[in-house]
Amino acid sequence: MDLTLERVQMRFAQPLTTAYGVLHSREIVEVTLTGEDGRSGRGEAAPLEPYDGVSIERVLAALDAYRRALARPLAAGVTVLDACRAADDLPQALAAIDLALWDLGGRRAGRAVCELLAASPARTIAVNASIGALEPAEAAAAAAAAVAAGYSCLKLKVGVGDDDARVAAVRAAVGPEPQLRLDANGAWSVEQAERALAQLSRHGLELVEEPVSGLQAASELRARVPMRIAIDETAAQAGALTARVADAVCLKISRCGGIGGLLAAASLVRASGADVYLSSTYDGPLGIAAALHAAAALAPLPPCGLATLELFEDPPALRVERGEIAVPTAPGLGV
């Protein structure tokens, strides 16, 4: 098979403040995988170094190794993913190949990927609005606008600045009905998180995502606070998916190595008794489409963090309508 690459730069409409820094733009790598029959599938590698520690250069090196591996005939019984994994077992790069294979398979079958994954996939996916660690008045205005646009769940960045003022302003702006989840990106120690959440809990929270970093810290905090804890970055650690240290686990296409890896991870999480929801690492359209297809197969799910294309200048298709995104219906990934 032939593999070609294209680096794509996407700029945020407004700088995005998180616990691991301010993001002004986002670089991804789009891939095209072409089979001997001339048909092609497209995928995407979306590492985010401040989040997952994987650089674009590291992904490009892995993809170049895949290109060399796929230029040779595959041995009997060896799949494309097997050959790529043997060349460089990097989930963020393998995700691009996995997505391209699903896209190619769907195009060949004339069916949307979600229809290859489930007999009765969901047609729309509820999503949360994402609000950065803004000043309280700005966060409140963004939250009110999101609710007016039809969102029923808001995710607010914390761990930076005056969290209590920010959360209080958002809750006051939207009233008691919308679900409010916080995301600290592991900014707190167990003691800091316990103190912060004792104060923030009065604002009515659905859950708190990655308040601390690491399995041991998550387990300790969960025993101390009377609210739902979710893990995100910590979910990448060995044994995390079945560790029973959280009420919910946030899964991402990039970190799981693609659609196949995400579905397998979701099965492990659900078997442990925790809930699953999906999110993005500010992916491009191919990554978001892939997550929507996976979510459609896993539904019902809590609101997912897949509305992030709205954060970029000139957002492409897959727009949010009344707090939901329609799952693409065209063959393959559909974008």
Image (cartoon, helix red, strand yellow):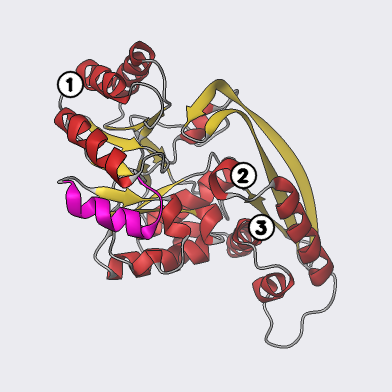
Mark sitting earlier along the chain (3/2): 2
Q: Is mark 2 on a helix, strand or loop?
A: helix
x and y, in percent, of residue 86 in the image: 70, 75
Q: Is residue 328 left or right of residue 187?
A: right
Q: In which quadrant of the rendered image does the N terminus lie?
A: bottom right
**Residue 49: which numbered mark, if any?**
2
The residue at the point 85 percent across, 70 percent down is: 71
Mark sitting earlier along the chain (3/1): 3
| Residue span colored magenta | 212-225
Q: What separation in Å lies between label 3 and label 1 (alpha carbons)?
A: 42 Å
The majority secondary structure of the magenta stretch comes to helix
Q: In this view, does 277 lie above or below 27?
A: below
Q: Is residue 82 left or right of residue 185?
A: right
Look at mark 3 in the image and give the residue it sits on.
93
Q: In which quadrant of the rendered image does the C terminus lie?
A: top right
Look at mark 1 in the image and give the residue it sits on.
175
Q: Which of 214 and 16 is in front in this view?
A: 214
- Disc 3 to disc 1: CB gap under 8 Å: no
Q: Is residue 37 left or right of residue 281?
A: right
Badge 1, how many Cα within 10 Å: few under 14, some, many 20+?
few
Q: Which amino acid does label 1 sit on?
A: Gly
Q: Can the viewer see residue 48? A: no
Q: Nearer the viewer, mark 1 or mark 2?
A: 2
